[in-house]
Image (spheres, rainbow, N blue to C red):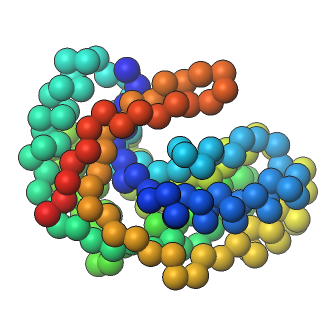
Amino acid sequence: MRAFVAVELPEHIKARIFHEFETLMEKDVFGGKFVEKENLHLTLNFLGEISEEKAKKVIDELKGVKFDKFSCSIGKVGCFPSREHIKVIWVELISENNKLKGLYKAIKGKIGNADEREFESHITTARVKFVKNKNKLAETLGKIHFKKLDFKVDYFSLIKSELTKQGPIYRTIEKFNLS
């Protein structure tokens, strides 16, 4: 199974993010794929392809993660790898006292990390294949703002990802409550 560890977003947060990006969809300034509303999340650790046996071991290890609940807020809109060469459009997730990075490190300490890139707290909203109008895209992204969009993180999840022709289907395998 293909799996990852993530912070799942509350429905009202997903709805607001998705609503803001509907305007970008209407502008038709790039070719690519928007992340479906129900699939918006923050990946903490991408595990890749793992066996059922390995998933059970991961669950046992993740049960040992001790971390306090904390607050998060939605931040600015950004792009990977850069504004000049856009492949991913994302929304920043900001946590009090950098708690998201702390949770990431606590999880990594228990199960390691298949992805060697530095952790960057972001919610992927679109994957870009090509840009039709770079100026219009930059202008539209610059107009997306989230004011007072906060929520409490009181658990993280192990999620199974099944890739289909229609897009990925995510299923929560297990939730791990924070203190």
In the image: residue 82, left or right of residue 179: right
Number of on-image labels:
0
Q: Above or below — where is 32 with respect to 178?
A: above
**Residue depicted at 20% across the width and 18% down the height:** 53
Q: Which is nearer the eye, 97 or 55?
A: 55
**Residue depicted at 44% across the width and 59% down the height:** 10
In the image: residue 162, left or right of residue 155: right
Q: Which is nearer the eye, 168 or 104?
A: 168
Quadrant of residue 2 in the image? top left
Q: Above or below — where is 148 with respect to 144?
A: below
- Residue furthest bottom as drawn: 148
**Residue depicted at 88% across the width and 65% down the height:** 136
Question: Residue 151 in the image: x percent, y percent?
Answer: 40, 71
Residue 19 visible (yes or no): yes
**Residue depicted at 66% across the width and 21% down the height:** 165
Quadrant of residue 119 in the image? bottom left
In the image: residue 134, left or right of residue 149: right
Instruction: Quarter of the image for the N terminus: give it.
Output: top left
Question: Residue 80 in the image: x percent, y percent?
Answer: 61, 54
Residue 113 visible (yes or no): no
- Residue furthest front as drawn: 12
Question: Residue 55 in the image: x percent, y percent?
Answer: 24, 26
Q: Above or below — where is 11 with respect to 161?
A: below
Q: Which is nearer the eye, 121 or 178?
A: 178
Instruction: Quarter of the image for the C terminus: give it.
Output: bottom left
In the image: residue 115, left or right of residue 147: left
Question: Residue 177 in the image: x percent, y percent?
Answer: 20, 54
